[in-house]
Image (tube, coloured by chain):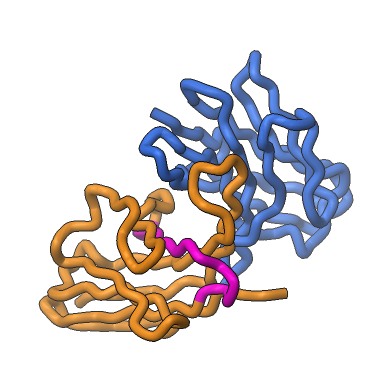
Amino acid sequence: AQSVTQLDSHVSVSEGTPVLLRCNYSSSYSPSLFWYVQHPNKGLQLLLKYTSAATLVKGINGFEAEFKKSETSFHLTKPSAHMSDAAEYFCVVSDSSGGYNKLIFGAGTRLAVHP
Amino acid sequence: EPEVTQTPSHQVTQMGQEVILRCVPISNHLYFYWYRQILGQKVEFLVSFYNNEISEKSEIFDDQFSVERPDGSNFTLKIRSTKLEDSAMYFCASSIKPPGTGANVLTFGAGSRLTVL
């Protein structure tokens, strides 16, 4: 069965410093992986997706993630945090095992950005 | 940018009451979903819907739950007799691609928070 583990429930960074949100996945075959972000009172917004093309994926707002099959990881990074990046981030794997795919969510990482 | 809209944003109900959560998916999307997140827990898949029928549902989606697309625009989730454990944030989503076709990107709404007392 597919699953994702987000290794940190909370991450706190200073504005202008790098962001690293960690995610490990478990999949019996080549997965589709996503990062979604949720700002307060907003929907879940897609940041980026990996679908077996380039292993380094660039997303919106300066975020990127690297798919590392040997480490079963899909960590999310950003070189320089902005106050507006404060939100909850979800690592997600697509489970196609039943013929129809559904999204399997990690527990989420809450990112705090301090001035 | 097209959005998925959900109403109400917050509903408080008494245990045993029926609740209907409404969603307006993106207009050219054909596949519809409900997910939920109980406070402090992961976002969980409930059901997917295509061509006026359920295509997949989870173990959570028991006989107390139903979905329909009554008028070609709204997509509703009904809980017939709410229980305390139904308290959660319910997210509607839609997609244009069929499930199972690689990167099936879902667009989510802002959620409806249901509180059962």
Q: In this view, does A20 lie above or below B82?
A: above
Q: Where is residue A110 in the image (x, y as percent from the top left)?
A: 59, 52
The stretch in magenta equals B25-39
Q: Nearer the viewer, residue B32 or A75?
A: B32
* Residue closest to the eye, A112 or A62: A62
Counting from the top left corner in percent of width and height, residue B30 is at 50, 65
Q: Position of residue A111 (x, y in %)?
A: 65, 52
Q: Camera-side residue: A69 or A37? A: A69
Q: In this view, does B64 lie above or below B8?
A: above
Q: Which chain is orange?
A: B
Q: Quadrant of residue A15?
A: bottom right
Q: Residue at x 64, y 61 (%)?
A: A45
* B28 drawn magenta: yes
Q: Is residue B28 left or right of residue A54?
A: left
Residue B93 rendering spot, x and y as whole percentages: 49, 64
Q: Is residue A45 above or below residue A111?
A: below
* Tint of chain A: blue
Residue depicted at 16% across the width and 68% down the height: B83
Left or right: A62 as drawn, with respect to B22: right
Residue B9 seen in the current view: no
x 62%, y 52%: residue:
A36
Q: In this view, does B117 lie above or below B108?
A: below
Q: Which residue lies furthest to the front in this view?
A: B51
Q: Residue furthest top?
A: A70
Residue A114 is one of the magenta-drawn residues: no
Q: Which residue is drawn at 79% across and 32% down?
A: A56
| Image side of residue A89 versus residue B8, left or right | right
Q: Where is the C terminus of chain B found, in terms of image quarters? A: bottom left
